[in-house]
Image (tube, grey):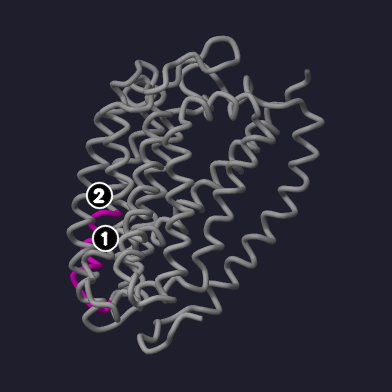
Amino acid sequence: MEIVPWLAFSWAFLLALAVFIYVVLDGFDLGLGILYPFYPIKRDRDLLMNTVAPVWDGNETWLVLGGGGLFAAFPMAYSIIMPALYVPIMTMLLALVFRGVAFEYRWRTKRWLKYWDAAFIGGSVVAAFSQGIALGALVQGVEVSGRAYAGGWWDWLTPFSLLCGAAVVIGYALLGATWLIMKTDGPVQDRARKLAWGFGLATIACIAAVSIATPFLDSVYYNRWFEMPGLLISAPVPVAVLIITVLMFSSLRTHRHEYRPFILSLILFALCFVGLGISIFPDLIPPNVTILDAATPYNSQIFMFVGAVIMLPLILSYTAYAYYVFRGKTDPDEGYH
């Protein structure tokens, strides 16, 4: 079985890119549901939904691409990850389905409106929390024997995975708040700016907590972050996080900056993603399964890679076009159709 390193690593990069784009796009989308309790008035809640109504379902395309790409390019990793993280992954998918149904049904009823709003909030929080738990469980390590999962049913449930779950919920709320600053005006925007301050501070605290805990999960992580030559690569990341944090809170202090808080919060997420890559690369499933271990043969990967290289720009293009068409502020008097 011929494994070509450059191709396997290219596939890993494409999958990481798909997951990151999903986090960016669906993160603020889920964040709006998390922020729903802070906007109890129906008109405000309608406005929150209208800011993402034209694009919300397309955001989850990237989740499908990430999962499908993992199955196609790294089937061994897929066969290990699924039984290891079956509960949080299935919980996330069910929450996304329930949330999608609530998104549509809340516009069609008055009697059951409060229940569908509650479903929208619950689906958003549970989906985000499940994603964080799955990430934390993967980072802390998966027990593997041969080419199969060898751990227990509840190995994913640990203090570290719960911390990651809470961090993702809070981080998505920050994305949602900065999105509202960009897309709304008046009292809704003013409240979003205050929420961005609170969730921003909580996000930084969560980043610090996860960053402190991660190196002590495994000696390999510790070496990559605190010993040479890994220190040369890892050291700029916390410095960059500090700089972006200062810039983000500075932009929140003035109403002149409406786009900058959202862009800076996305950069903050990107830096966290870089930190995650530094921690686990070249592992695909820490600590024992590398990218090359899990890769399919060359013929399979090159065939799919050509298709991915063609399709990825197309997906990026129509996604960018959709956001371009619906750019600017959302009119609070416009309905969702």
Q: Quadrant of residue 217?
A: top left
Q: Quadrant of residue 44?
A: bottom left
Does residue 144 sit above or below 158 in this rendering? Answer: above
Q: Residue at x 71, y 48 (%)?
A: 308
Foreground: 318 or 56?
A: 56
Q: Residue at x 23, y 71 (%)?
A: 39
Quarter of the image where the N terminus is located: top right
> Tag 2 or tag 1, which sits nearer the N-term?
2
Does residue 240 sit above or below 112 in this rendering? Answer: above
Does residue 5 sit above or below 119 in this rendering? Answer: above
**Which disc number belongs to residue 149?**
none
**Which disc number belongs to residue 247?**
1
> Is residue 255 part of the magenta span, yes or no?
yes
Point out the residue furthest to the front here: 111
Q: Is residue 135 left or right of residue 55?
A: left
* Circle 2 residue: 203
Magenta-tinted stretch: 244-256
Foreground: 272 or 195?
A: 195
| Amino acid type indicated by mark 2 | Thr
Q: Is residue 146 left or right of residue 134?
A: right
Q: Position of residue 71 (x, y in %)?
A: 65, 35
Residue at mark 1 to residue at mark 2: CA–CA distance: 15 Å
